[in-house]
């Protein structure tokens, strides 16, 4: 496999960054991740736009324009020739001489084989447990996943698949996915602030707006108690229906579920690439 690091394509086994890199020393960095079907990166422009928003917020600046970065990514895809894969773009604070001050960033782009998501919606049990927590700089896709990883043993002990963060009863996000619920009146609701706005989230809001009422607004744990359906979304998951959340919510899904219609609309959107 070939990776791209700081201006050069290189065998992934030989890839390296300095030990005084701020991403390693202090966890200071941002990243983005996108799926690739054959040679076609999905929703690439949206991912690049979000990456550059994260960079601006974190006061990091690449020497590449967006168009140049897209060319680099496409070249990497062409060299590796994977049937289905993921691209991870990581930008760190660089090799800081004092271990604290960001300098020229390190740019790392890696490609890896990943399973292709099914074109039919999964209906296996998918349980969430809630935890009181809000990420630092939640609107930015940083490399900081400390809490999410630390909670993994506890999540498994609860028999759950993931954790849903909330602050004082107001829901924000899961560590790697956005959260949605559908009310008894068939209104799609998702949190508006205090979380990372995913690319898949944006695409869901777009396709959902054609078939139902959509609201971006605060979502409470009490709202979830009264929900008709709920699901999470991400670039790799597309949409996964949530079957349970603590003792607040339990649901099963069938061919008449609204979430299935949204899933099918999202798959159709991907087919345009």
Image (cartoon, helix red, strand yellow):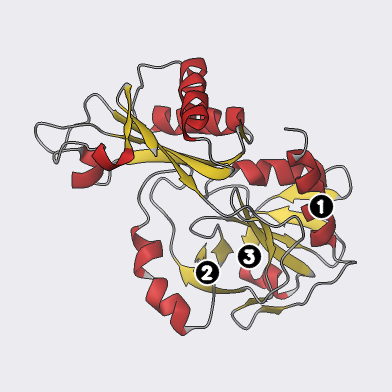
Residue 109 visible, this orientation: no
Q: Tell me the crowding category of disc 3: few under 14, some 14 to 19, or many 20 or more residues within 10 angstroms, Cα based.
A: some
Q: Residue at x 75, y 73 (%)?
A: 226
Q: Nearer the viewer, mark 3 or mark 2?
A: 2
Residue at position x 52%, y 28% in the image = 78
Mark 1 vs 2, N-terminal side: 2
**Helix, strand or loop for disc 3:** strand
Is label 1 in a helix, a strand or a loop? helix
Of residues 193 and 91, which is closer to you in this image? 91
* Image marks 1 and 3: residues in contact by CB distance under 8 Å: no
**Where is residue 151 drawn, in percent x and y?**
39, 71
Q: Is residue 108 left or right of residue 188?
A: left
Residue where numbered disc 3 is placed: 220
Q: How many marks?
A: 3
Q: Nearer the viewer, mark 1 or mark 2?
A: 1
Q: To which residue does mark 2 refer?
A: 162
Circle 1 Cα neighbour tier, 10 Å, few/some/many (<14 / 14–19 / ≥20): some
In the picture of the structure, the residue carrying the numbered disc 1 is: 264
How far apart are the two marked residues, 1 and 3, measured between alpha carbons?
28 Å
Spatial CA distance of label 1 from label 2 is 23 Å
| Residue depicted at 34% across the width and 28% down the height | 59
In this rendered view, identify the residue nearer to me: 22 or 221: 22
Labels 3 and 2 touching (C-beta < 8 A): no
Write down the quadrant of residue 123 in the picture: bottom right
* Quadrant into which the N terminus falls: top left
- Frontmost of labels 1 and 3 is 1
Q: Is residue 113 above or below residue 181?
A: above
């Amino acid at each position: 496999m070939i990776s791209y690091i700081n201006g050069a394509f290189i065998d992934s086994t030989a890839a390296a960054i300095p030990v005084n890199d701020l991403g390693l020393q202090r966890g200071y960095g941002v990243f983005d991740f996108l799926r690739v079907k054959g040679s076609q990166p999905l929703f690439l422009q949206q991912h690049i736009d979000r990456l550059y928003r994260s960079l601006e917020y974190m006061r990091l600046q690449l020497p590449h324009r967006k168009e140049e970065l897209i060319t680099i990514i496409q070249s990497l895809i062409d060299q590796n020739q994977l049937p289905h894969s993921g691209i991870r773009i990581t930008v760190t604070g660089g090799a800081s001489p004092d271990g604290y001050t960001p300098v020229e960033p390190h740019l790392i782009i890696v490609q890896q084989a990943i399973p292709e998501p099914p074109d039919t919606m999964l209906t296996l049990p998918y349980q969430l447990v809630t935890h009181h927590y809000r990420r630092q700089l939640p609107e930015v896709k940083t490399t900081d996943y400390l809490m999410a990883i630390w909670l993994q043993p506890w999540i498994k002990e609860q028999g759950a698949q993931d954790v849903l963060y909330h602050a004082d009863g107001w829901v924000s996000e899961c560590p790697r996915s956005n959260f949605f619920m559908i009310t008894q009146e068939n209104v799609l609701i998702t949190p508006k602030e205090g979380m990372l706005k995913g690319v898949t989230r944006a695409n869901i809001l777009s396709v959902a707006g054609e078939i139902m009422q959509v609201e971006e607004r605060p979502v409470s744990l009490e709202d979830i108690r009264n929900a008709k359906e709920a699901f999470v979304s991400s670039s790799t998951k597309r949409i996964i229906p949530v079957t349970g959340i603590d003792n607040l919510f339990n649901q099963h899904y069938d061919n008449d579920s609204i979430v299935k219609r949204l899933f099918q609309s999202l798959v159709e959107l991907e087919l345009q690439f």
